[in-house]
C-alpha cells in the first residue's frame, strides 16, 4: 500500500534546509523510518524506553530541546505526530 505524502517530502526538505541537516542525516532518518514502519506502537515504545535508559542526563536534555524544536514546526507535523513527540518528551523527562 502506498501512502499519500501530501507534500510531506517538500515539507521535510524545507525543514531540513532551515535546520541545516546534511544529506547523510536525511538518509539516516529515512532508514530509521523504514526500520520502524511495520512495528506496533508498543514495540516502538519498548525500544524507546530501552534506548532512553542508555542516555546521560545531558543527552536527554539535548534531545528534548530538539524534539521541542521539531514540535514547533507545526506545518510539518499532524496532531498524531505531535502527540507522539509529547509522549517521547515525557519518557525522556523521567
Image (cartoon, rainbow, N blue to C red):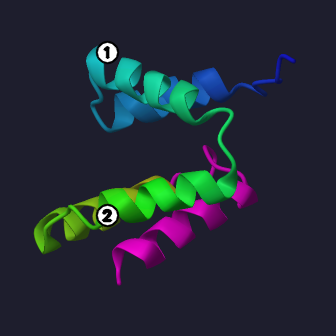
- Element under label 1? helix
Mark 2 residue crowding within 10 angstroms, few (<14) / some (14–19) / many (20+)? some
Which residue is rendered at x = 64% and y = 47% of the image? 75
Residue 40: x and y in percent read 69, 48
Which region of the structure is painted magenta? 73-94
Quarter occupied by residue 83: bottom right
Question: In this view of the protein, which residue sits in the foreground, 92 or 47?
Answer: 47
Rendered-image quadrant of the C terminus: bottom left
Quarter occupied by residue 10: top right
Residue at numbered disc 2 = 52
How far separated are the C-alphas under marks 1 and 2? 26 Å
Residue at numbered disc 1 = 23
Is 9 left or right of 52, judged from the image as shown? right
Question: In this view of the protein, which residue sits in the foreground, 51 or 17?
Answer: 51
Could you tell me what secondary structure mostly forms the magenta stretch? Answer: helix
In the image, which disc is placed on residue 77? none
Amino acid at each position: 500500500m502506498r501512502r499519500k505524502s501530501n507534500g510531506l517530502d517538500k515539507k521535510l526538505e524545507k525543514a531540513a534546509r532551515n535546520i541545516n541537516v546534511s544529506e547523510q542525516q536525511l538518509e539516516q532518518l529515512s532508514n530509521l523510518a523504514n526500520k520502524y514502519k511495520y512495528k506496533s506502537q508498543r514495540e516502538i515504545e519498548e525500544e524507546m524506553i530501552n534506548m532512553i535508559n542508555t542516555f546521560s542526563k545531558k543527552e536527554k536534555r539535548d534531545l528534548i530541546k530538539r524534539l521541542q524544536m521539531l514540535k514547533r514546526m507545526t506545518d510539518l507535523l499532524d496532531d498524531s505526530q505531535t502527540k507522539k513527540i509529547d509522549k517521547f518528551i515525557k519518557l525522556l523527562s523521567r
